[in-house]
């Protein structure tokens, strides 16, 4: 919405005169966004990519209850550096970040990292499903088969999907679990044909069917295509991979591929690093960790075998 008297306090804090103000919530972290670019506002208001990348995403033009956790200004001022942090407020350069408008989703993911890690919450690039109360994290690069495996779990094992590309993990009631999910899947055309989902739009985004907010993690599976067919149970390697995923975004790397080799500043510190290690160690020591190497058919068969084990172990506890 255009700035008005109701946001006079916000306006008075800024050096730049911003025309639009709105609020984004990721899980339970609120971000106040100010910008003089209508493209940014319309992107967050209507584009499904943010709902795919940012777990438990919501958009509002109304002032939320309480003070926003993070303040972000995106300006087209030519003197603005790519990003700076000043007096509890992030300032970002539209011209550097928004050559591809989708980068603003990653910008939001970046600016909430300090707030997340202070609360013991960690963003992980993963798919996640729940089978009978047991959560499974599916790790892998883009195209490794995470979404295919997650939808297969739903179709063949009655799983409830938590997300296909992003999850927030942390501890709840002293149990390590997935606490939030992305509420929009990105699916290729072959998924709709294979799994009979007919509510996809032309860009192959769809709302998550039978979604589940959180689940206690019982298994972590890494998908490694284009290798010799092998299956390993490897908690040590799982710890290293999980730590890498938990650390990428606060360090300003990972998904943040910006033009002209620009990078975001590293906001990590030794306190955050120690807490991540302790959390990851607790999680890995309490779950089974598998690595599936091979072609797509072998990996999907391996996933189905592991899903069957989870389903059987859950049934035995009933």
Image (cartoon, rainbow, N blue to C red):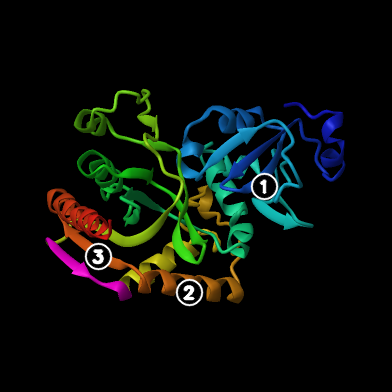
Residue 230 lies within the magenta run: yes
Q: Quadrant of the N terminus?
A: top right
Mark linked to residue 290 = 3
- Stretch in magenta: 229-236
* CB contact under 8 Å: marks 2 and 1: no
Comparing 84 with 208, the one in front is: 208
Say which quarter of the image contains residue 232: bottom left
Query: Which residue is situated farthest in the front direction here?
Result: 318
**In contact (CB < 8 Å): disc 2 and disc 3:** no
* Residue at 33% across, 62% down: 218
Residue 50 or residue 282, whichever sits in front: 282
Residue 149's place in the image compared with 100, above or below, is below
Q: Judging from the image, what secondary structure is the residue with disc 1 in?
A: strand
Q: In screen coordinates, is 298 left or right of 248?
A: left
For disc 2, the marked residue is: 277
Query: Label 1: which residue?
Result: 92
Which callout, 2 or 3, points at the residue further toward the start of the chain?
2
Left or right relative to 135: residue 87: right
The residue at the point 34 percent across, 50 percent down is: 130
- Check disc 2: other Cα within 10 Å, few if <14, some if 14-19, many if 20+: some
């Amino acid at each position: 919405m255009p700035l008005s008297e109701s946001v006079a306090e916000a306006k008075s804090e800024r050096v730049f005169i911003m025309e639009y103000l709105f609020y984004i919530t990721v899980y339970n972290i609120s971000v106040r966004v100010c910008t003089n670019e209508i493209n940014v506002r319309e992107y967050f208001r209507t584009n499904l990519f943010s709902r795919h990348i940012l777990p438990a995403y919501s958009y509002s033009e109304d002032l939320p209850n309480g003070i926003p956790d993070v303040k972000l200004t995106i300006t087209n001022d030519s003197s603005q550096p790519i990003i700076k942090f000043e007096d509890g407020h992030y300032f970002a350069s539209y011209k550097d970040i928004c050559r591809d408008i989708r980068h603003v989703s990653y910008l939001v993911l970046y600016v909430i990292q300090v707030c997340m890690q202070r609360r013991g919450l960690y963003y992980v690039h993963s798919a996640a499903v729940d089978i009978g109360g047991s959560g499974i994290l599916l790790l892998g690069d883009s195209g490794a088969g995470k979404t295919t495996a997650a939808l297969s779990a739903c179709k063949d094992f009655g799983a409830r999907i938590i997300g296909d590309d992003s999850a927030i993990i942390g501890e709840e009631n002293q149990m390590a679990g997935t606490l939030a999910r992305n509420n929009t899947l990105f699916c290729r055309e072959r998924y709709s044909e294979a799994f009979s989902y007919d509510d996809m739009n032309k860009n192959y985004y769809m709302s998550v069917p039978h979604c589940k907010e959180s689940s206690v993690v019982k298994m972590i599976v890494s998908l490694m295509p284009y290798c010799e067919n092998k299956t390993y149970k490897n908690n040590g390697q799982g710890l290293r991979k999980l730590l890498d995923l938990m650390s990428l975004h606060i360090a300003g790397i990972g998904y943040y591929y910006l033009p002209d080799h620009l990078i975001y500043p590293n906001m990590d510190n030794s306190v955050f690093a120690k807490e991540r290690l302790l959390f990851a160690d607790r999680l890995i020591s309490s779950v089974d960790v598998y690595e599936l190497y091979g072609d797509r058919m072998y990996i999907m068969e391996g996933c189905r075998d592991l899903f069957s084990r989870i389903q059987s172990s859950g049934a035995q506890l009933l």
